[in-house]
Amino acid sequence: MSIGQVFPALYETQLTEKAERLTQLLQLDDTAPLQLFRSAASHFRQRAEFRIWHNGDDIYHAMFDPETRQPVRIDYFPVACTLIADFMPVLLKQIQFNHELRYKLYQADYLATSTGELLVSLIYKRKLDETWQLAAEQLVASLSTDYKIKVIGRSRKQKVVLSEDYVIETFNVDQQPLHYQQVEGSFTQPNAGVNQQMLQWAASVAAELNGDLLELYCGNGNFSLALARHFNQVVATELARSSIKSAEFNIALNKIDNLQVLQMSAEDVAAALAEGTTLKQLDLKNLALNTVLVDPPRAGLDPATLALVSGFDDIIYISCNPETLADNLAFLQKTHQLQKVAMFDQFPYTHHIETGVWLKRLPH
């Protein structure tokens, strides 16, 4: 894809190519046919990051060409959701001749929600003072009639939050709204439309299951919140403290009373379950953890976690790397059978593939 451009006429072709690649990698057949979940062909990203380029009085957004490493001017960015794409030139017009906001401005990051909230992080190569803060507050005030905007200023070892450093996204799953705190600088799924489809797919799988759910790598509770209503108890684990705080915020925000988040690595969870006594403060004897959901990093599951996961009756595996997924499935299919496989086109016009897999233990 050309930097910052989309080609809707080619969307179905690239989607078909991805589906064929995934089908071959996972050696799929008619017993578990591939389900395809499409993205919008343009304006699909809720997050975008740009360098800010200064050229005399001119100022513009730029991205770097991955091959030439040269900056490419971006005047309009149809990859981003309409809110971000339309706001980018508005921001530049506001700061172009505003010395306090423009001076040594290095980067601009945008985080938007499908419900119209917009968080803008302005990143500088200078220390920010009260004069900058006053100018930023005036900027927000001038834009607040037309935008639900929040602004953060950043520089080395400095973060200035004018109001809040997060937005609240809303997804509808099982015809119920779920609200998610998304914090500036923390990971969230960038394609809101596809993420909602992922949550609904996972919830449709969970609706066929029962007992209790263990989730590894839960992040801000993206899947945990959507699946909680289908299980008696949900235990979710995560290492990053910032993600745990967001997950706990989201649990309270959605008034979910059967979901607990623990700060534990997958390795620590495996060790605790092997001992069969407690999982931090939870007594395992009171839980029927027969389903596990994993959403690992690109490296996939390590051998210890693979062994742990293979002990569950049902496995829901969300993957951002089809190669490591194929390797992990070669191990898991010794004990489990594929029930459903889905491809979610989180990143149109790129080679990246997001996959959802449901496996059920083979009968003894």
Image (cartoon, grey):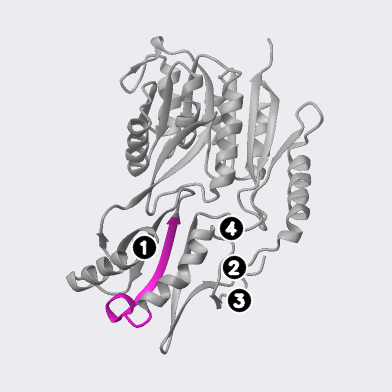
User: Which residue is denoted by mark 3 in the rendering?
Assistant: 68
Q: Along the polypeptide, which appears first: circle 4 or circle 1?
A: 4
Report, in whole angstroms, how far the alpha carbon at label 3 lies from the one at label 2: 15 Å
Please indicate, yes or no, whether residue 88 appears anywhere in the rendered image: yes
Residue pushed farthest bottom?
A: 56
Q: Amino acid at mark 3?
A: Thr
Q: Position of residue 188 (x, y in %)?
A: 46, 47
Q: Amino acid at mark 2?
A: Gly
User: Which residue is denoted by mark 2 in the rendering?
Assistant: 4
Q: Position of residue 185 (x, y in %)?
A: 39, 54
Picture layout, residue 275 above or below residue 219 = above
Question: SS class of the residue under badge 2?
Answer: loop
Nearer mark to the viewer, of 3 and 4: 4
In this view of the protein, which residue sits in the foreground, 185 or 271? 185
Question: SS class of the residue under badge 4?
Answer: loop
Look at the image and tell me in which quarter the N terminus lies. Answer: bottom right
Q: Position of residue 30 (x, y in %)?
A: 82, 29
Q: Amino acid at mark 1?
A: Ser
Magenta region: 96-111
Report, in whole angstroms, how far the alpha carbon at label 4 lies from the one at label 1: 20 Å
Report, in whole angstroms, how far the alpha carbon at label 4 lies from the one at label 2: 11 Å
Q: Along the polypeptide, which appears first: circle 3 or circle 2?
A: 2
Residue for point 70% across, 26% down: 338
Q: Along the polypeptide, which appears first: circle 1 or circle 3?
A: 3
Nearer mark to the viewer, of 3 and 2: 2
User: Which residue is denoted by mark 1 in the rendering?
Assistant: 121
Q: Which mark is residue 358?
A: none
